[in-house]
Structures are given as C-alpha cells and as structure tokens.
C-alpha cells in the first residue's frame, strides 16, 4: 500500500515536471515580452511589467503591423483555397472506386515527403520571371502547394468515419450526389473540416522557409520578421519576445479551441 | 451529373493544385540539376553539363560534412523523441486530472512556430544572461562555463533539444493511439501473477507497440531530415559549419551562392534520401493495415 502511494506521488511529480518542461520556454518568452530592455538581460522574476515593447514593435523601423497583416492575408487565403478543394477531393477518395486510386493517393501523400527546399528553387525563378517575388500572392501559392495534400489526407480521415447510411437513404429518396454532399456530408464533416482548416492555418502561419526566400521587404511575414530583431547592437530580446507573443497567441487560442479534435486530427493523417 | 464523371470532377481542383504546385517545380529543378546556372551572373540557365553537378557533390567536403551533420542530427533527434514519447504515452494513458491537464498543455510546444522556438532557445542559452545556461550552471557547476552555442558539439545538443521539445508531443499522441489498441487484459493478468510493472511492460506491452514505434520512428526521421527553421534562427549553421544540415546546405547553395544547378542537384540528393525513407514508411503502414484486417 505504501509503495503504491509512493508510486502515485512519483507519477504526479513526473507529470508536473513534464508540464514545466513544456511550458517553461513559452512562459519565459511571455515574461520577457513585458520586461523593459534592461530587465530582459536579468534573470530576476521581480520586475515592473511594461507594455512598451508591444508599442515599439509596431513603430518604425520594425513595423510589425504590416508583417502581421501579411501573415493574416497569407494564412487566411491559403485556408480559403486549399480547404474547399481538399474537402471535395477527400470525399471522392473516401467514397468512390477510382481508377488508379492507390497511385493517386500515394502521389498525394508522397508530396508531403518532398523537402520544401526542392520546391522553392523553381518557385523562386518562376516568381522572379513574372515579377511576383516579395508579394503575398507568391506565398499563398507555395503554401497552398504544401498544405493541400496534407489537408486532403486529414479530411479523408474524418469523412471515412462518417457512416454511409444517411447518405444512402437520401440517394434512395432521389437526392442528387451534390445535394447529398451539401446537405448531409458537409454538415456531418463540419467539425473535422474546421479542425483541418485550423491545422492548415497553423502550418501556414508558422511557415518560415518560403517566406524567408520569397520575400524581402513588402511581403515579410511574422516568423521571418523575428530575424530582423538581430541588429548590429545585438539581439533585441525583449522586442523579439513581444513579436513572439503575437505570433503565438492566435495559434494557441485556436489550438485550445479545437483541443478535443486536435489530438485525433493531428495523428489521423499519419496513421490512417 | 452522373457519379462516373462527378467523382473525377470533385478531384479536379485539388489535382490541378498539386500538379501545378508540386510536380511542375519538381520537374523543373530536375532539369536544372543538369545545367550550369550561376544566378548572380546569368539570368537564364546555361548549357547542359551532364552529371557534373552531381559528381561535384562527392568531392565537395562541405557537402560530405553536411551529410554527416544531418546523420548525427537525425539519429539523435529520432532516438530521443521516440524514447521520450513512448515513456510519456505510458504515463499519460492513465486517467487523472493532472493527466488530462498535461495532455492539453503539451499541445503548445507543437503549435509553436519552429522559427520562434529557435529564437527563444537562442535567448535561453545565451552564456551571459540565458536563463537555461545559467540554470544548468547552477544545478551542475561542471557545466557552468559552457558557451552553449559557440561550441560545435553543444550547439548540436541544443539544436536537437529544440527539435525534441517541438516533436515529442505529436509523437506522444501517436504512441497513445497505438497503446489504446493494445488490450490490457494480458498485461493485467501478468501483473496479478506477480510480474513487476517493468517486466509486464517489456514482455507484453512493448512487443505489441512495435508497429507504432516503427511508424513514429520513420515519420520522425522524415521530419528531422526536413528540419530547417531552427538552423537559421538558432545557430545559422554554426559555429563554423558544425550545424549545417543538408537542407540548410541546399539553401546556401541556392540563395547564398546562387548556384542554381548545383543547388538543384543537392536538393535531389535530399529528395532521394527522403524517398527511400518514405517508401519504407508507406510499406510499414500497408503492413500495419494488413495485420489489422487479418
């Protein structure tokens, strides 16, 4: 009895430790964001919190506002393009016998395993030739490319889990396939599609490589903007942290909103 | 519209997107890998040079070095992540309020931008005022004077650490999925018969988790090969070239030295490695499914 009690305590302590390890870097960044320049270089937990950093980053020369705007435009557009296209394809993959279905599906999955650096070289040339370098259009195109296969995969997992019965019943009553999709499948798959959309948003929002290569001044997004806080005077940690908080907060809120589906959604694609 | 046509019509938008945005660039960089093209001087690709760009790689010590760096990074990151996620999955499969809380909390490291993770670890490992550098020094005085990111081996340790911190949650969830499929009856019977927790785990649970662990390991290998963001924001490939992975090397070849032909060839080396691992992965999945339906 005594031993099980001890085990229980040990288990709880381990869990607390896990939470601390997971949270510490995040908490430290949040704290630093509210410190003034001098306190940021001090490890003390006692400091006078200030909102200055959040104002500073929006002013010249940092202009985080335009980066924030770019990030929002790119992430929202990517979701709006790739999720509807992926949902239709996922339905087709899930419900129909297709010629060369395995090959097609494999091709879709295989694109996930192509390193982004391979794709970005030709895109760089292409966008240079048509004058789209350093625009949000370019970023939307490449992000759609990377995200769409993943979203198809994820939504297919959710549609597979919907029983066929109600669909079949409606078809018997003479409803067309498109009506069935609109009136029956889409509402039932809505939580799954929403989860996939949020996933897609998070991936795009955090995307770094493409934005680093394809943008210079006008279309820079938040993750790349972080690098600009490295100056000749050294790294401006308190400003970086403030920017970090702004990158993180929307993502964390979304992740928590879909927290229940999140674990299922994020593993569904990989194991199914 | 009949289903016969509709089913392909539904696929069309996604199909077009994938074709235009993935297969076209792939073909384009494949063609470029056989040409000479120094972007800084030449606006258009120059003549074909056969396999020169590929053979050149094998005499390029920096390329070979980056292969080695990649191998070290991938192996350490995969081993550590798999080990920790199996442990964590075992711990989290029980019920309890702290368990539920932990399951929610660990989503956060996964949702965080990898570029930002690199930045924040760089801050925490700063030798003068980094909270982790100082904290580790206080707990283990032997490690007090390490300049973490200025030392080749320790910089690699921190790089691996950022990746493990980011990916362990995701892999834990996958392991939990695998664990949920393992029936508890045998394990409980063994425990009642007096087997220790450890024995029951090694003899009964672990063999049944074999497939999930393999899937997690291969998937993590793929992600580790693709890892790029933290190299830029944490170490910049340094000190020296000690953390210059293959993905970062390709990036340098293309966008620092503007050698498009060479960069394309290098990119195809990376793709080839990824493809081998991916095929292995898909075969694992198919095997897994066969076993599930048998």
Image (spheres, coloured by chain):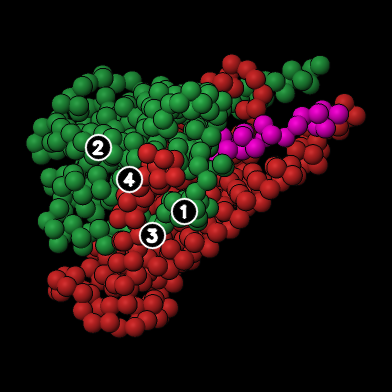
Chain colours: A green, B red
In this view, A241 is above or below B122: above
In this view, A151 is above or below B152: above
Image: magenta residue range: B165-189
For the N terminus of chain A, which image quadrant? top right
Q: Quadrant of residue A4?
A: top right
Q: Is the C-beta separation of discs 2 and 1 under 8 Å?
A: no
The structure residue drawn at horizontal position 28% and vertical position 62%, both measured from the top left corner, is: A121
Q: Quadrant of residue B188?
A: top right
Q: Is the C-beta separation of discs 1 and 3 under 8 Å?
A: no
Q: Secondary structure at mark 4?
A: helix
Give the numbered dot on residue A104: 1
Residue at the spot of label 4: B13
Residue at the spot of label 2: A77
Q: Quadrant of residue B65?
A: bottom left
Residue at the spot of label 3: B247
For the C terminus of chain A, which image quadrant? top right
Q: Chain of mark 1?
A: A
C-alpha span from label 2 to label 3: 28 Å
């Amino acid at each position: 009895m005594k031993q099980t009690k001890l085990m229980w305590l040990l288990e709880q302590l381990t869990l607390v430790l896990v939470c601390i390890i997971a949270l510490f870097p995040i908490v430290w960044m949040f704290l630093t964001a509210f410190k003034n320049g001098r306190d940021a270089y001090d490890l003390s937990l006692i400091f006078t919190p200030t909102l200055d950093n959040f104002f500073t980053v929006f002013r010249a020369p940092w202009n985080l506002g335009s980066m924030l705007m770019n990030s929002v435009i790119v992430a929202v557009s990517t979701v709006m393009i790739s999720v509807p296209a992926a949902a239709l394809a996922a339905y087709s993959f899930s419900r129909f016998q297709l010629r060369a279905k395995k090959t097609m599906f494999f091709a879709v999955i295989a694109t996930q395993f192509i390193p982004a650096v391979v794709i970005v070289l030709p895109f760089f040339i292409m966008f240079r030739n048509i004058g789209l370098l350093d625009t949000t259009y370019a970023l939307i195109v490449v992000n759609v490319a990377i995200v769409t296969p993943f979203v198809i995969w994820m939504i297919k997992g959710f549609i597979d889990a919907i029983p066929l019965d109600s669909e079949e019943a409606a078809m018997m009553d003479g409803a067309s396939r498109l009506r069935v999709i609109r009136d029956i499948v889409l509402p039932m798959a809505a939580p799954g599609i929403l989860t996939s959309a949020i996933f897609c948003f998070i991936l795009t929002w955090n995307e770094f490589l493409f934005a680093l290569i394809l943008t210079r001044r006008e279309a820079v997004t938040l993750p790349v903007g972080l690098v600009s806080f490295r100056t000749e005077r050294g790294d401006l940690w308190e400003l970086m942290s403030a920017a970090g908080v702004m990158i993180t907060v929307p993502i964390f809120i979304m992740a928590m909103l879909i927290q229940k589906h999140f674990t299922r959604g994020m593993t569904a694609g990989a194991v199914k | 519209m009949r289903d016969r046509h509709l089913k392909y019509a539904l696929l069309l938008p996604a199909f077009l997107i994938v074709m235009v945005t993935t297969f076209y660039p792939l073909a384009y960089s494949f063609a470029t890998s056989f040409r000479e093209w120094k972007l800084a001087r030449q606006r258009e690709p120059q003549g074909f040079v056969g396999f020169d760009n590929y053979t050149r790689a094998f005499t390029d010590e920096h390329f070979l070095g980056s292969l080695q760096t990649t191998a070290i990074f991938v192996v350490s990151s995969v081993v550590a992540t798999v080990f920790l996620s199996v442990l964590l999955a075992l711990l989290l499969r029980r019920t309890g309020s702290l368990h539920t809380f932990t399951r929610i909390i660990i989503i956060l490291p996964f949702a965080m931008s990898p570029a930002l993770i690199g930045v924040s670890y760089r801050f925490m490992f700063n030798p003068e005022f980094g909270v982790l550098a100082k904290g580790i020094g206080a707990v283990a005085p032997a490690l007090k004077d390490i300049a973490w990111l200025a030392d080749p081996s320790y910089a690699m340790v921190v790089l691996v650490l950022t990746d493990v911190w980011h990916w362990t949650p995701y892999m834990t969830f996958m392991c939990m999925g695998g664990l949920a499929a393992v029936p508890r009856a045998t394990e409980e019977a063994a425990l009642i018969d007096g087997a220790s927790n450890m024995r029951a785990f090694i003899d009964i649970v672990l063999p049944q988790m074999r497939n999930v662990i393999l899937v997690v390991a291969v998937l993590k290998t793929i992600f580790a090969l693709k890892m790029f963001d933290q190299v830029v924001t944490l170490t910049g490939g340094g000190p020296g070239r000690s953390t210059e992975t293959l993905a970062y090397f390709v990036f340098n070849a293309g966008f620092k030295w503007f050698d498009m032909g060479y960069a394309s060839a290098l990119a195809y080396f990376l793709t080839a490695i990824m493809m081998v691992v991916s095929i292995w992965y898909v075969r694992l999945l198919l095997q897994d499914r066969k076993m599930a339906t048998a």
